[in-house]
Image (cartoon, rainbow, N blue to C red):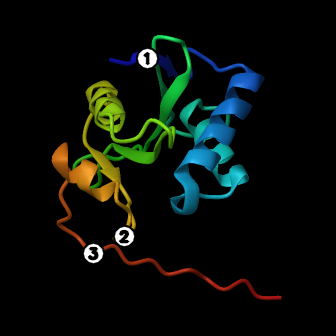
Amino acid sequence: MLKFKIYNSNTKMSTLDKLNAVEFLYKHLEQYGDKKPDIEKSVQYALQETPSFGGFILEGYNDDNNVIGIVVINRTGMGGYIPENILVYIAVDNSERGKGYGKELMNKAIELSEGDVALHVEKDNPARFLYEKVGFTNPYLEMRYKKQLSN
């Protein structure tokens, strides 16, 4: 059973804790992650260090106070037609996978979220099965258009 720390606009993270969280996510998201500056932006958004609707960072610790997993939830500022929250990142230490920690983190993050939660997952990501186990469904096909920057 994990112990949890929750950070948000009221409970700030130290600069060192933020750097460690970004590094943890970057390392343990592996090929399904993003660049460190993008991860840092989502953390700043959740903590309302940039103009945003906020959210929270959830860290799960073992009995030895080692970080086992981290979740980043950003609030969307919407509701009803778009979920109020987006689970931006969830990562479990790769040496601790398969022990139920991901499910524990996911359930705690859902419990702490006010409103519905959405997430994006690549179809070949094995974490997809965890998301389905806790109740996420895939009623839509997401499509994105990326604008080309002109010179």
**Label 3 SS:** loop
Residue 134 position in % (x across, y down): 19, 42
Determine crowd level at label 3: few under 14, some 14-19, many 20+ residues with C-alpha closer than 10 A: few
Amino acid type for the residue under numbered disc 2: Asp
Mark 2 vs mark 1, CA separation in Å: 29 Å
Residue 71 visible within the image: yes
Closer to the N terminus: mark 3 or mark 1? 1
- At 72% from the left edge and 51% from the top edge, which residue is drawn? 37
Residue 21 position in % (x across, y down): 63, 33
Compared with 138, 72 (above or below) is: above
Image quarter where the N terminus lies is top left
Amino acid type for the residue under numbered disc 3: Leu
- The label nearer to you, 3 versus 2, is 2
- At 33% from the left edge and 73% from the top edge, which residue is drawn? 142
**Label 1 SS:** strand
Determine crowd level at label 2: few under 14, some 14-19, many 20+ residues with C-alpha closer than 10 A: few
Amino acid type for the residue under numbered disc 1: Phe
Residue 56 visible within the image: no
Closer to the N terminus: mark 2 or mark 1? 1
**Label 2 SS:** loop
Image quarter where the C terminus lies is bottom right
Residue for badge 2: 124
Closer to us: 147 or 107: 107
CB within 8 Å, label 2 to label 1: no
Residue for badge 1: 4
Residue for badge 3: 141
